Image: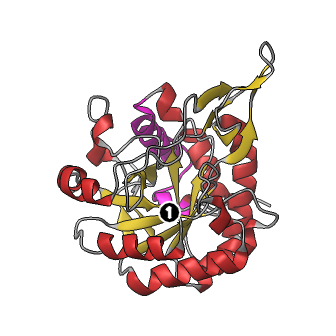
Amino acid sequence: MADLKVDIGGLVLKNPVMTASGTCGFGTELEPFIDVSSLGALVVKGTTIESREGNPYPRMAETASGMLNSVGLQNKGFEYFKRNTYPKVREYNTAVLVNINGGSIEEYVELSERINELDDIAGIELNISCPNVKMGGMAFGTHLPTSEKVIREVRKVYRKHLMVKLSPNVTSITDFARVAESEGADSVSLINTLLGMAVDAETRKPVLATVTGGLSGPAIKPVALRMVWQVAGAVNIPVIGIGGIMNADDAAEFMIAGAAAVQIGTAMFIEPTAPLDIIKGLNEYLDNNGFKKAKDLTRTLNE
């Protein structure tokens, strides 16, 4: 069997398969289906300083080869996470990262400082690319000077692994990746959802209460794959690939294009065991193609 261990900016994972934030809650929701400790890493649901109710319903919709969501970062806030969720997730024998969000740079900084207090959190995924919130969210991830400032300020206070989640809703994602690298990010994850919408032809109304939402699933895979390839060629920090990864072949393709690891999201809505199936299939792919180590698959595209 191949050695699945990968190193992403000093954070060593037992395998390159992570969960994507917002698709598995805080990990405990997966326990009836999989051994969470078997994952390369668990990226928990987006967390904010204060509790958020999220957007009004309906806020999810199935689309051709994908899904739209406009959940709006619903969560009970950091103090609830610290008291009730952290004691559970710290017991997992895998790296746990917290996806963090804020309505201002000050909120991002304060939340990062508070997470510093949690010894068994391996890192944060700085989400400056969410298209489903009115305050903050994508506004930070689509304006270069603002992205630069929020990453810089968070880096000043956060000691452990800093992963920056990039928005695809920009003209040149490589520019944002370079800014993340220059301001001290240890890795970048991409892509977040593409901005989309759905219309009900019978009622002539939007399907989502917020009209637009984030598109994920197989429909966005070609775009995500292209952006991962571009970013991997533009920066020296590890790239985490996200976007329509449904099986081991998809995961292998992202790694070939330049990803050091991958995140699984929409696939878990169809099959909660998808991450473990992908780990097993990736191992078989590596064995069948003569790779002794998973890390050796990264950036092997024959151009």
Q: Give the answer, above or below, for where 150 lies relative to 47.
A: below
Is 210 or 11 nearer to us in this picture? 210
Residue nearer the viewer, 289 or 175: 175
Give the residue at x 47% y 45%.
Answer: 22
Q: Is residue 295 magenta?
A: yes
Q: Is residue 132 magenta?
A: no
Residue 262 visible, this orientation = yes
Q: Choose top left, top right, bottom left or bottom right for residue 27.
A: top left
Residue at the spot x=24%, y=50% of the render?
A: 85
Mark 1 Cα shell of 10 Å, populated few (<14), some (14-19), many (≥20): many
Residues rendered magenta in the picture: 272-296
Residue 267, how many percent across, how many down? Answer: 53, 34
Q: Left or right: 187 with respect to 222?
A: left
Q: Which residue is mark 1?
A: 295
Residue at left 70%, top 52%?
Answer: 225
Expressed as whole percent of the image width and height from the top left, the position of residue 229 reads 71, 61
Q: Nearer the viewer, residue 183 or 292?
A: 183
77 left or right of 238? left
Q: Quadrant of the C terminus?
A: bottom right
* Secondary structure at numbered mark 1: helix
Position of residue 211 relative to residue 130, above or below, is above
